Image (cartoon, rainbow, N blue to C red):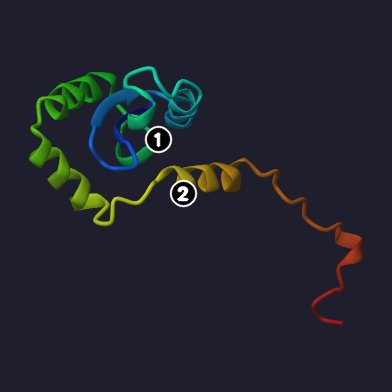
Amino acid sequence: MRNFIYIITDRNRNNLHVGLCQDLLKTLDFYAEMPTLFFDSSKHLNRLVYFEEIINDDMAMDRFKYVSTFTRPQKEKLIRSANADWTDLTKGLKLEQQLYSRPAIRPLNNRLRKPLNA
């Protein structure tokens, strides 16, 4: 099963929250629905700035524990290694989900096609 280690922050980048989940988009929706769950409204965690996908559950838990012990400068270095501009990665994930969840296009019926040698 896929697991994701992620770092989410507020608009001012004051708080960096490390998390572990199995469905990243569902977790991000949860943060959007519960804006004051961890902090008050001024520190609303709404920007996904880093994530890793890990297949093995044990490896994911070990990596989560390891990243959770990072100091703020270490977390910032990790984020900048993958996302130098600290852009919100949520939009790209949602676009990718839409692309992969679109229904497959049916091929044209053979009798409507012209033969190649005609």
Vertical relation: 40 (above or below) 6: above
Vertical relation: 83 (above or below) 37: below
Neighbour tally class for label 1: few under 14, some 14-19, many 20 plus, Cα within 10 Å: some
Q: Could you say which is closer to the camera, residue 31 or residue 98?
A: 31
Q: Name the residue located 52 percent from the left edge and 42 percent from the top edge.
A: 94
Q: Name the residue located 28 percent from the left edge and 56 percent from the top edge.
A: 85
Tell me where residue 73 sits by quadrant.
Answer: top left
User: Circle 1 is placed at which residue position?
Assistant: 46
Instruction: Please state, as top left, top right, bottom left or bottom right, where the N terminus lies in the image.
Output: top left
Tag 1's secondary structure? Answer: loop
Q: Could you say which is closer to the camera, residue 41 or residue 99?
A: 41
Tell me where residue 45 sits by quadrant.
Answer: top left
The x and y percentages for residue 9 are 30, 36
Q: Amino acid at mark 1?
A: Asn
Tag 2's secondary structure? Answer: helix
The x and y percentages for residue 60 are 24, 25
Which one is in front in this view, the residue at disc 2 or the one at disc 1? 1
Instruction: Please state, as top left, top right, bottom left or bottom right, where the C terminus lies in the image.
Output: bottom right
Q: Could you say which is closer to the camera, residue 30 or residue 6?
A: 30
Q: Mark on residue 9? A: none
